[in-house]
Image (cartoon, helix red, strand yellow):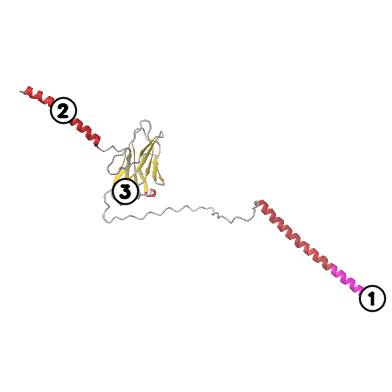
Amino acid sequence: MSTNRSRIRLPLSRPVFTAAAALVVLGLAAGPAVAHAGVTASDPRALAENVTLSFTSEAESDTAGIAELRVVLPQGIAPDAVALKDAPEEWKLTATPDGYAIGGPALATGTDAEYSITVRQLPDAKSLAFKTLETYGDGKVSRWIEVPAGGEKVDNPAPVLELKAAAPGARAIAPSPSPSPTPSTAPSVQPSAAPSGPVAPAGARATGEEEAGGQETGNTTGLAVGAGATALLLAAAGFWWVRRNRGGA
């Protein structure tokens, strides 16, 4: 009897095992796609201040390591409100018009890029998407910039941070003023009105001024000489007229 029971159980166990394996495969296929770039927060609440955001970008190239990550910040986070907290050795963060770029020497092939930044304050939102471009040492670029909507699946999902409701009494802090430009020691040059006629070179203008001064001096000297000569002529005529009148008498 025991032999018959074992014979019956064996053929029945095979279809059960096959069905279970099929269910597992279907479950894995229907599950969420593995994220290639992710983000977590030390305080994932709206309007939270001085929050540390940690990012992980998985290495996918078999020939080169990650050398740079460029991130587009979501609305409500300005580039000047971000500071680097931790990064791979010799990596630096540089602000860009729409976010920041962080990078340095290429990591070893197959090494994930992990870094963290500090954000002055998170915006009042339900979720934040950080579109990311991964650049490898060989120039290859992976674009994780798609934001799923309505639960749909995307091929290149951007890192998304889900936020909880803001703490009671939380308020948005005033944005920091833009840095004023560094004053320059050189005086500023104001545009002057354009002259009506052609402008002569500086040397020519200087020469012309000297000539004008020489002409003015010459004219003055000529007038003085002329006046002296006239006075002498008048004196001689007067002397001659007096002698003539005396001779006649």
Q: Which residue is mark 3?
A: 51
Q: Residues within 10 Å of mark 2 (few under 14, many from 20)?
A: few
Mark-to-mark CA distance, 1 and 3: 127 Å
Q: Is residue 179 left or right of residue 165?
A: right
Please provide the residue range marked out in magenta. 233-249
Marks 1 and 3, the one that precedes in the sequence:
3
Q: Nearer the viewer, mark 2 or mark 3?
A: 2
Specify the label residue 248 is tagged with.
1
Name the secondary structure under disc 1.
helix
Q: Name the quadrant of the C terminus.
A: bottom right
Marks 1 and 3 in Cβ contact (< 8 Å): no
**Helix, strand or loop for the magenta stretch, by majority:** helix
Mark-to-mark CA distance, 2 and 3: 53 Å
Residue type at mark 1 is Gly
| Residue in view at x 77 percent, y 62 percent | 221
Q: Whole-percent x and y of residue 225? A: 80, 63
Q: Nearer the viewer, mark 1 or mark 3?
A: 1
Q: Nearer the viewer, residue 133 or 86?
A: 133
Q: Whole-percent x and y of residue 5? A: 8, 24
Magenta stretch contains residue 148: no
Residue type at mark 2 is Pro
| Residue in view at x 39 percent, y 44 percent | 100
Specify the label residue 15 is tagged with.
2
Name the secondary structure under disc 3.
strand
Query: Can residue 128 be seen by looking at this rendering?
Result: yes
